[in-house]
């Protein structure tokens, strides 16, 4: 996967996170799970960038 594709997906995941947080609050399980998904994409980006 290319760096740009990873960045686009990270932004999509971040947008979903913000939407969920505004709808359900920051401590809702859906928000926490989405935050973990975003973390996975951020880690993937860092590995790709540094690899």
Image: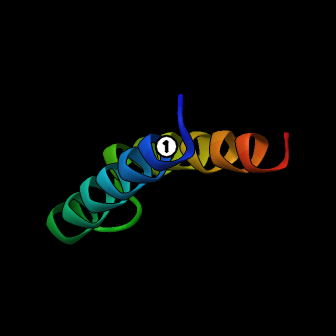
Please provide percent x and percent y for residue 21.
28, 65
Q: Residue at x 46, y 53 (%)?
A: 7
Horizontal side, residue 2 vs residue 21: left or right: right
Horizontal side, residue 11 vs residue 1: left or right: left
Residue nearer the viewer, 44 or 34? 44
Horizontal side, residue 26 vs residue 15: left or right: right
Residue closest to the far left: 23
Q: Quadrant of the C terminus?
A: top right
Quarter holding residue 20: bottom left
Q: Up-down: is 27 above or below 9?
A: below
Quarter holding residue 24: bottom left
> Which residue is labeled 1 in the image?
6
Residue closest to the far right: 51
Q: Secondary structure at mark 1?
A: helix
Residue nearer the viewer, 40 or 4? 4
What crowding class fits label 1: few (fewer than 14 Cα within 10 Å), some (14-19), or many (20 or more)?
some
Please provide percent x and percent y for residue 27.
41, 61
Tell how many labels: 1
Residue nearer the viewer, 34 or 2? 2
Residue nearer the viewer, 19 or 4? 4
Residue closest to the far top: 1
Describe the colour scheme in one phrase. rainbow
Q: Residue at x 69, y 45 (%)?
A: 43
Please provide percent x and percent y for residue 22.
20, 71
Horizontal side, residue 47 vs residue 27: left or right: right
């Amino acid at each position: 996967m290319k760096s740009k594709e990873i960045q686009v997906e990270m932004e999509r995941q971040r947008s979903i996170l913000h939407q969920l947080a505004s709808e359900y609050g920051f401590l809702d399980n859906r928000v926490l799970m989405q935050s973990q998904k975003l973390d996975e994409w951020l880690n993937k980006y860092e590995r790709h960038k540094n690899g």
